[in-house]
Amino acid sequence: DTAVSQTPKYLVTQMGNDKSIKCEQNLGHDTMYWYKQDSKKFLKIMFSYNNKELIINETVPNRFSPKSPDKAHLNLHINSLELGDSAVYFCASSRHQETQYFGPGTRLLVL
Amino acid sequence: KQEVTQIPAALSVPEGENLVLNCSFTDSAIYNLQWFRQDPGKGLTSLLLIQSSQREQTSGRLNASLDKSSGRSTLYIAASQPGDSATYLCAVRPDSWGKLQFGAGTQVVVTP
């Protein structure tokens, strides 16, 4: 009965690789988000989708590309991974712009 | 540009004491404010959401107040328990489609 789930939970990879993180919500929400939490624990939004349409696109490198195949899924693909991409990535969802519910996070380590 | 500040960065209290966590924001034109809890190695759990038209919200031992004119919100946790140990984050939304702007959080330790 997990509300917002992410896979994988941990991801260790080499510089230059391409990787994807998947997110699914079963709350019937229409808006989904990707956040990055850096080593200092500061949380910043990266993208937001509403009904599969991109509504927030923060200043992130073009190597990061979100994809929303349907309202319940928002995946994050990262090309040519760099050391600085190491962080915890959180997916979240909400109904309209109300309370956001977060997934457990994906801990990415780039070596 | 909206800036969200949480003071103190860390707080340690004995069990049973009331907790007072502060959040301040520089731009009073907000849509809503949300308080979250984050346990080590875990995601965020929403605690309370206060709309801009509201002055406070309550849920069990938690009470959050909002004073938009002074750019402040306070989270009160009554009769703290060791299970309340976590990092507490506040986040403001500037408008109905705007992004949540997070503070850096207050790390709370409640000692038995």
Image: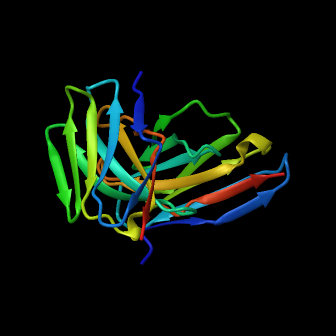
Q: Quadrant of residue B81?
A: bottom left
Farthest residue toward the top? B1
Residue A9, given in percent of the width and then of the height, sits at 64, 66
**Is the residue A84 above or below the residue B58 in the image?**
above
Depth check: give the residue in front, A68 or B51: B51
Quarter of the image for the C terminus of chain B: give it: bottom left
Q: Quadrant of residue B71?
A: top left
**Is the residue B1 above or below the residue B102 in the image?**
above
Horizontal side of residue B37 vs A111, given as left or right: left
Report the number of numbered marks: 0
Depth check: give the residue in front, A53 or B94: B94
Residue A35, given in percent of the width and then of the height, sits at 53, 46
Residue A13, given in percent of the width and then of the height, sits at 81, 57
Depth check: give the residue in front, B107 or B32: B107
Residue A39, given in percent of the width and then of the height, sits at 65, 46
Q: Residue at x 85, y 46 (%)?
A: A16
Quarter of the image for the N terminus of chain B: give it: top left
Q: Is residue A28 visible?
A: yes
